[in-house]
Image: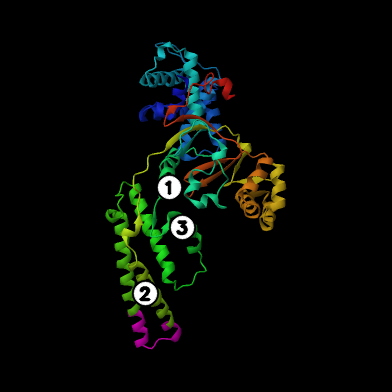
Amino acid sequence: MHEVGVHLGFKNLFNAGQYKNLVKAVQNWSKLNDNSAEARIAKAALARVKSAKTSKEQFDDELLAYAVEEAIKAGVKPTALGVKGSPIANWLRMVVDTLKRALSAFGINSENLKVGELVNLAYGAAQLEIRGTWHGSDAKFKAFDTNYAGSGEGTFDLRFLAEESLGAGPYTTPDKKYAEYYQHAVPFGKASNETGYGSKSYQDYRSADAKYMDSDRPYVTPVVDLQHIYENNLLTNYLQDVAQGGELNPQNNKGAKKYLDRLLEQTESNVKEQAATLASREKRKAKPDSIESAREDLRLANNQLKAAQTLELGKIKGLTKRPETGQLYRTLDDVPRERVYAINSTFTFGERPKLDALMKKYGDKRLQARAKKDGEYEANGLFYDMRRQLGIKKTTEILKAAGIDAIEQNNERGRYTERAFINNAPEIIGVNMEPVGQSEGLLFSRKAAA
């Protein structure tokens, strides 16, 4: 029973109108200056949210979560039904009553639960909004095993294993949508290893990605190189279309067909355009370097057309069956902020002596000079310097010795946050919203949370 309230999450307990009213009540109480319980609790909750530098999207969630916590810490209890109490007691009673209805939806007779147990459940749901995280995977398990780190995304995206990663993990995120992406992407990515084009496998293209992104490549790219790039793009368009429900048969796959038709049309048009440009410059006797530039453009355009004309949908090795949906895990992240290395942040000298020492030993000299002047140094600067010099495995080992348990960064231009654990793992509370199993005692009871 006790897991159910936790899995629901505080925000999921209420409809939009109820949720808005709960938030508004706390906001109004925070403006009071009468030293009432409501004012003290709301001000304390608001201060904690601001101190945590909560994002705008999560502000209301955490304000309510902290308000429940502060109310319970202050000894507020929901009054019996039908008996009016203080505004904060009635507010907390609404939380408890709503939780009762939610438990009934799970087939649990909440009337047999004591008020104290319900308060603990409400507190647990609030805590989950603050500390709860998510993890998406293709595998099903009840606890993370670091021996399997890298066996998820790393098996189909080789960039994960390169120097761009935060370490072996496991990885969690406070953003459910981001975890849901991996819930689908990991099993689909692994299935992609079965595909390819001609004699090349999916991994052949992944392995060569860096080579074809090299800015030092010659301008007039050889046909064989262009073939590889176009084949990669054709295979990628096929897979993307399948991921959205498209045909498994490459010959009937709309994404692949659309890409190939568009590529042929564009390359044919480009050849005509570049030929006309060259003819025009030769006719008006333009400068030699201008004519030579036009010839290079035409040679490239011809190579592009030749490469495009070699593509065939029938050469795509397609998927034989559609990948199954993966697993979505609800996890508990209890790593204290002082033991998290947040890459998208700055550190102040003197706060973490061990990190100061790492900065002096591995940090960029120019970054150190700027840091000495400002009193702060950029976390990502030190992390990337260490990773470049030592590799990710050694870097995480050194950070662990310096008191760091997890590394955190913002992805997708700051839209999502992910956290990689070092030699430890978060607790799994549920899989696909189903409890992992009975806990020993109350999850998130005031005693445990403290």
The secondary structure that most of the magenta stretch takes on is helix
In screen coordinates, is 369 left or right of 85?
A: right
Quarter the C terminus occupies? top right
Q: Nearer the viewer, residue 92 or 235?
A: 235
Which range is magenta?
276-291
- Seen at 54% across and 41% down, the residue is 149
Residue 245: percent from the left, percent from the top? 31, 46
* Residue 297 picture quarter: bottom left
Q: Helix, strand or loop at disc 2? A: helix
Instruction: Name the image quarter holding residue 23.
Output: top left
Q: Residue at x 49, y 27 (%)?
A: 126
**Secondary structure of the residue carrying numbered label 3:** helix
Name the residue: 54% across, 45% down: 409
Q: Identify the residue position indicated by label 1 in the image.
A: 189
In the rendered image of this protein, does residue 114 appear above or below residue 449? above
Q: Residue furthest toward the front?
A: 199
Q: Which mark is residue 302?
A: 2
Where is the N terminus found, in terms of image quarters? top left
Q: Are marks 3 and 2 in contact (CB under 8 Å)?
A: no
Q: Amino acid at mark 3?
A: Asp
Disc 1 versus disc 3: nearer the observer? 3
Q: Residue furthest left?
A: 252
CA distance separating discs 3 and 2: 26 Å
**Percent coordinates x, y for residue 421 in the rendering:** 58, 39
Q: What colour scheme governs how the chains and residues are painted in the rendered image of this protein?
A: rainbow
What is the C-alpha distance between the residues marked 1 and 3? 14 Å
Residue 29, can we see it?
no
Residue at the spot of label 3? 204
Residue type beneath disc 2: Asn
Query: Which is nearer the N-term, disc 1 or disc 2?
Result: 1
